[in-house]
């Protein structure tokens, strides 16, 4: 989970000090690209480390295997004013339990260091009055309280994250054992697969929510706006929340204005707003509860209400309900889980669309109501509400390339079931050879493979005359704009993010030109 950690972290080789891994927080801290850090000496990223004892500490931790800390150290990092970092280091153990590297966690202590320096300077002055001394004490106490609160928040977040990920992982483990024991019991196998699919969707929602929070925090979230009907947005949200609503035996009523209402927004994010509100209502309602979603026009705006008769919200929690990781903590509902992220995303997505959201509740046991207001997109063409049928298409020759053999095998089986001719390769060199022999119409290729990665394999295929017309599709866990640009430059036609939606894959196959 170091990728999601707000703490900057870097792993280095114990003997050469060569950086083998950096997380996004460390990249942001030092202000350099990851490609400029990995594979280079740690001293390139932290030049002051050669003078402040950091490298000596790194060598000692690697030699002894005992974790150690290094207090505030001054750094410049190309900034006009110095910054201060503290280090925590521990050994990375190999298969023989011997150190093979060192993990370094960096904490930015600039605020604390500057405050301490300021306090020392002022205390050394004979002109400091007793009143000023008292004010400085209050500031120090406030900073201490904030620091303790931040530590508690971090520890709570990590504990909840661990709990929420263990639930679906435990279900997967049990499901795999059940599938092994099903031995011809088709009902047991089908029920087990359904359960595993539900748990997979839950895990994907957790990961997606965490990624959205990260994108919003770093200002990297982009909306793909278009003219979209409110009815279409609400319909998608209701369908996505149906399983949770039905599992609680809840009764959902949806009331929309008779005339179409158009919005200027990102359909996926707008649906996520109402999905999160519906899931929240189901989560905090007694079994068999009533949930109402209603919309009404109010001048140039549309107001959508999601009301439930559930446990309600205490008055003290109302001002903080849209903050990240805040939950209505009740003993009987904590078993429902959740990261406390959903309502925070609701507020962010609504405001990114020029809207606003508020919550009302008379207190515990009195239910709650969330009100969302969006500006109406005047003069937009009304789009049909019905879903498009997934098109079918001819039989294709497809090459699946992935060093994760289970992932390649399952995708290949799915494509074969759909009637396509499929070959597999488990690394880039083999992919190029297979493509020359098989001459596929489509290559679905992972990027992060050893030796010859997906980028290089794509360039080699494109360099051949027979590779010019092949449709290359990157199938990867990386979906940022920079990643999409890199795949395009390497010769890929499309970029799909794992886990691939089968609807999208089937539609892409049907829309491919005939070879």
Image (tube, rainbow, N blue to C red):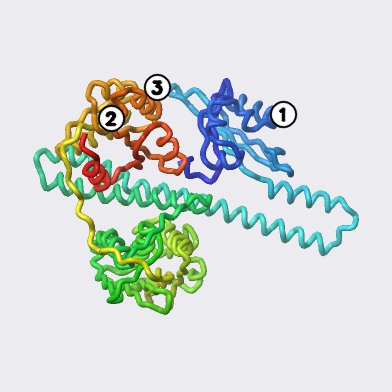
Q: Give the distance between the C-alpha atoms of the residues marked 3 and 1, in whole angstroms.
A: 37 Å
**Mark 1 surroundings: few (<14), some (14-19) or many (≥20) residues within 10 A:** few
Between disc 3 and disc 1, whose residue precedes?
1
**Mark 3 surroundings: few (<14), some (14-19) or many (≥20) residues within 10 A:** few
Marks 1 & 2, CB-CB < 8 Å contact: no
- In this view, the residue in front, 72 or 148, is 72
- In this view, the residue in front, 464 or 455, is 464
The residue that mark 2 highlights is: 405
Nearer to us: label 3 or label 1: 3
The residue that mark 1 highlights is: 51
**Going by the image, does 315 lie left or right of 503?**
right
Residue found 11% across the figure and 38% down from its top: 183
Residue found 72% across the figure and 38% down from its top: 74
The residue that mark 3 highlights is: 451
In the figure, 466 relative to 498: above or below? above
Specify whether residue 202 is in view: yes
Q: Is label 1 in a helix, a strand or a loop?
A: loop
Nearer to us: label 2 or label 3: 3
Q: Residue furthest right?
A: 126
In the figure, 167 relative to 405: above or below? below
Residue found 47% across the figure and 57% down from its top: 325
* Residue 481 image position (x, y, % from top left): 45, 43
**Going by the image, does 115 lie left or right of 429?**
right
Nearer to us: label 1 or label 2: 2
User: Which numbered tag is attached to residue 391?
Assistant: none
| Quadrant that contains the C terminus | top left
Write down the quadrant of residue 488 in the picture. Answer: top left
Q: Give the distance between the C-alpha atoms of the residues marked 2 and 3, in whole angstroms.
A: 16 Å
* Residue 338 image position (x, y, % from top left): 38, 56
Write down the quadrant of residue 404 in the picture. Answer: top left
Residue found 67% across the figure and 30% down from its top: 47
Q: Give the distance between the C-alpha atoms of the residues marked 1 and 2, in whole angstroms.
A: 47 Å
């Amino acid at each position: 989970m170091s990728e999601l950690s707000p703490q900057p972290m870097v792993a280095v080789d114990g003997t050469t000090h060569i950086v083998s891994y950096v997380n996004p927080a460390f990249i942001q801290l030092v202000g350099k690209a990851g490609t400029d850090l990995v594979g280079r000496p740690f001293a390139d990223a932290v030049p002051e480390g050669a003078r402040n004892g950091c490298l000596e500490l790194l060598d000692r931790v690697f030699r002894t295997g005992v974790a150690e800390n290094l207090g505030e150290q001054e750094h410049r990092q190309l900034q006009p004013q110095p910054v201060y970092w503290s280090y925590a280091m521990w050994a990375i153990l190999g298969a023989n339990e011997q150190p093979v590297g060192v993990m370094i966690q960096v904490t930015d202590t600039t605020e604390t260091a500057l405050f301490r320096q300021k306090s020392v300077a002022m205390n050394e002055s004979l002109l400091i009055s007793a009143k000023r001394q008292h004010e400085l004490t209050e500031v120090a106490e406030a900073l201490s309280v904030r620091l303790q609160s931040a530590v508690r928040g971090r520890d709570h977040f990590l504990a909840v994250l661990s709990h929420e990920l263990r639930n679906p992982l435990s279900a997967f483990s049990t499901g795999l054992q059940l599938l092994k024991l099903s031995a011809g019991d088709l009902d047991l196998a089908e029920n087990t697969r359904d359960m595993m699919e539900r748990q997979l969707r839950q895990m994907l929602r957790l990961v997606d929510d965490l990624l959205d929070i990260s994108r919003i925090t770093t200002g990297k979230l982009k909306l793909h706006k278009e003219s979209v009907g409110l009815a279409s947005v609400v319909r998608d949200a209701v369908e996505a929340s149906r399983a949770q609503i039905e599992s609680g035996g809840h009764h959902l009523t949806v009331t929309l204005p008779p005339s179409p209402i158009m919005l200027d927004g990102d359909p996926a994010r707008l649906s996520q707003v109402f999905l999160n509100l519906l899931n929240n209502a189901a989560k905090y309602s007694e079994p068999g509860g009533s949930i109402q979603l209603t919309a009404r026009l109010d001048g140039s705006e549309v107001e959508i209400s999601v009301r439930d008769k559930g446990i309600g919200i205490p008055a003290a929690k109302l001002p903080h309900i849209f903050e990240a990781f805040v939950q209505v903590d009740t003993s009987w509902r904590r078993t429902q889980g959740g990261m406390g992220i959903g309502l925070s995303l609701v507020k962010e997505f609504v405001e990114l669309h020029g809207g606003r959201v508020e919550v009302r509740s008379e207190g515990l046991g009195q239910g709650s109501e969330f009100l969302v207001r969006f500006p109406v997109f005047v003069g937009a063409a009304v789009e049909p509400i019905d879903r498009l049928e997934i098109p079918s298409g001819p039989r294709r020759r497809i090459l699946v390339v992935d060093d994760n053999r289970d992932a390649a095998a399952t995708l290949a089986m799915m494509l074969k079931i759909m009637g396509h001719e499929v070959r597999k390769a488990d690394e880039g060199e083999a992919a190029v050879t297979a493509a020359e022999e098989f001459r596929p119409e489509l290559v679905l290729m992972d990027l992060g493979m050893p030796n010859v990665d997906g980028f290089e394999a794509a360039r080699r295929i494109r360099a051949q005359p027979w590779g010019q017309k092949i449709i290359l599709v990157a199938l990867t866990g990386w979906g940022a704009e920079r990643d999409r640009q890199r795949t395009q430059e390497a010769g890929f036609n499309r970029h799909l993010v794992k886990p691939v939606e089968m609807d999208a894959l089937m539609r892409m196959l049907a829309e491919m030109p005939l070879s």
